[in-house]
Amino acid sequence: MRKLISFFAAVFFASFVLLYVSVQLNKTEGYAGENTLTVYNWGDYIDPALIKKFEKQTGIKVIYQTFDSNEAMMAKIAQGGTTFDVAVPSEYAVSKMKEDGLLIPLDHSKLPNLKYINPRFLNLSFDPGNKYSVPYFWGTVGIVYNREMLGGKKITSWNDLWDKDLRNQILLVDGAREVIGMGLNSLHYSLNDTNKKHLQEAKEKLDRLTPNVKAIVGDEIKMLLANEEAAIGVVWSGDAAEIIAENDNLDYVVPKEGSNLWFDNMVIPKTAKNIEGAHRFINFMLDPKNAAQNAEYVGYSTPNEKALDYLPKEITEDKRFYPDFESIGNLEVYENLGKRMLAYYNELFLQFKMHRK
Amino acid sequence: MSCASARMMVRDPMKNSVRNVYLFPYVIWIGLFVVAPILLILYYSFFDIDGNWTLANYKTFFTPIYLKMAASSVWYAFLITFFSLLVAYPTAYWLTKTKHKQLWLLLMILPTWVNLLLKVYAFLGIFGTYGLANAILETIGIGTKQILFTDFSFVFVSVYIFIPFMILPIFNSLEELNPSLIDAARDLGASAWTTFRRVVFPLTLDGVKAGCQAVFIPSLSLFMITRLIAGNRVITLGTAIEQHFLVTQNWGMGSTIAVFLIIAMAIVVIATGNRK
């Protein structure tokens, strides 16, 4: 008994000391003050040097927190316990948060740098007039393939994946909209198709792909492709850039039938306390030089037209990540299809997963 | 209990109220974290995706897709339990005969201290095309095989993860076994096999049952390993619950599946329960 009590006492003491030290540390770095800004972003999705620069320029201390899925982020913001001043949801999440009243409208007069954004990326269906959001990065969904493993075979379209030679060679990302969308695109239907007959058709076509599918995985897809566990992967362009940097044999293509165009966007959630600071932060990130620096660090495509001037030519002329939109049939943004339709997409995806070879 | 405590009340009301005070924290705990969540799950299972009251979720469960999923969950859980038992019983038996029992036991329990995700990730490397397992197959002349994303790798990794929970109760029941019973059986002319079959195994059956419960029940609702190790080629009810709660936000359907899982678990507990 005595031993037990002293054990608990020791644990309490240790946690107390740790808590005290961390509070003291935060104080000396100035985090306890009033003038803070909490940024809620995806992991490894900003150049840390830019945060330092922003702090120096404005005297605002930035607290940087990360999430790994839109759903987790929305749940935390809806719950409202923590102050988040800036968040970075994807486009469908923006429209959902807007619907749920989780966003504060942006004051465009405080965002003069908005003019540098390519007009193509403004005023999109998920947020008309950019009332609530400003694009942060954008990209596509496409195919990563290993030139070496495919022995020179070229992949240019979704339909190439149905090739009989590719047995057990394809990794798919575990996302209902991505995979069903690929089926729809391969049949030249829209990614936002809500016609159940078309969706059934897409699902049946996907079932025929099963012999070629090695696995349907999450974030591990990056590691598996870089390790040449399979020759082909269906991934987001950002992930593609990351793995191509790791393995020279890999290449990325946006299929010619069309694909998804996605955006991550800066918004000010309802939980914000420092709204002024949030605007300053967003405007800071829209500054062409900063946007260029960030794009170079993160490796995703920036929507900031002026920033392209500050990026090396190898990056901006890379058609894989800065495609010219005329050459690609149709790049569509996911529309919010509503809960019921999304449930139907997921139902089909589940059936596809259960389809045995 | 109520009957017994009622009688107690008449005899010794003071003592009884003190006893109830002791019970208090536990009752609160059970109420908040066992009964309330189950009732909530039951409650949510009657709502559709738009929040309307409905029985449709239960109807949906009885469609081929979910029945197939339920059948495959039970089948894989059975396989995992079976192979765990197959390995765990001899191991536990051998463990009781060794000199440094506590050390060996510690070594077997040690992996449970490591984060589950970490262990599963390690297997991604071991079973990969260029991993250790294939390197061994290659050197002994069998050649590279696809191990990752197969039924085999799924069952293997699950067994690896659950096996300590099977070994422990069996080991305990073997330890409690009175060795003179075995001597008596042998003296009376029973062969080693008969002794095991008629004396040792029946007397350790409670440990086996406890182990089977500890493995079968969590394996029914496995989800993460199905994606990481089986590449979503194995779909269990756990996967479906995860998807309904996190992606589709169809809490009603997710809860309905959870209700059936709870029923399945209750059946397992009752079926393997002690009938004394």
Image (cartoon, rainbow, N blue to C red):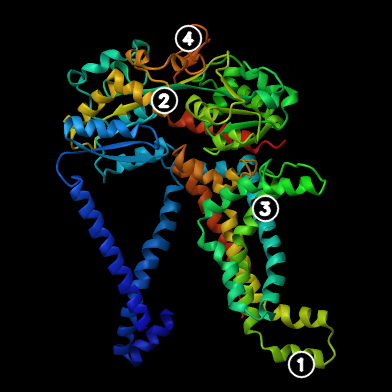
What's the CA distance linking mark 1 and mark 2?
A: 75 Å
Disc 2 vs disc 4: which is toward the camera? 4
Image-based side of B275 in relation to A71, left or right: right
Q: Which mark is residue A336?
A: 2
Query: On the image, numbered disc 4 is attached to which residue?
Result: A324
Q: Position of residue A8 (x, y in %)?
A: 33, 73
Residue sitting at the far left: A34
* Three-letter residue code for mark 1: Ala
The answer to whether one can see residue B177 in this image is yes
Q: Could you tell me which secondary element the residue under label 2 belongs to?
A: loop
Disc 1 vs disc 4: which is toward the camera?
4
Q: Residue at x 35, y 75 (%)?
A: A7
Depth order, front residue of B50/A19: A19
Which residue corresponds to mark 3? B155
- Cα–Cα gap, marks 1 and 3: 40 Å
The residue to which callout 1 is attached is: B184
Q: Secondary structure at mark 4?
A: loop
Q: Write the residue at 53% across / 55% down.
A: B116
Same chain for marks 1 and 3? yes
Q: Position of residue A346 (x, y in %)?
A: 53, 33
Q: Quadrant of the C terminus of chain B?
A: bottom right
Residues under labels 1 and 4: Cα distance? 87 Å
* Quarter occupied by residue A202: top right
| Amino acid type, mark 3 | Val
Give x and y (percent) for residue A123: 33, 15
Q: Chain of mark 1?
A: B
Q: Residues within 10 Å of mark 2 (few under 14, many from 20)?
A: some
| Residue A225 against residue B111 in the figure, above or below | above
Q: Residues within 10 Å of mark 1 (few under 14, many from 20)?
A: few
Q: CA distance from mark 3 to mark 2?
A: 38 Å
Name the subunit of mark 3: B
Discs 1, 4: same chain: no
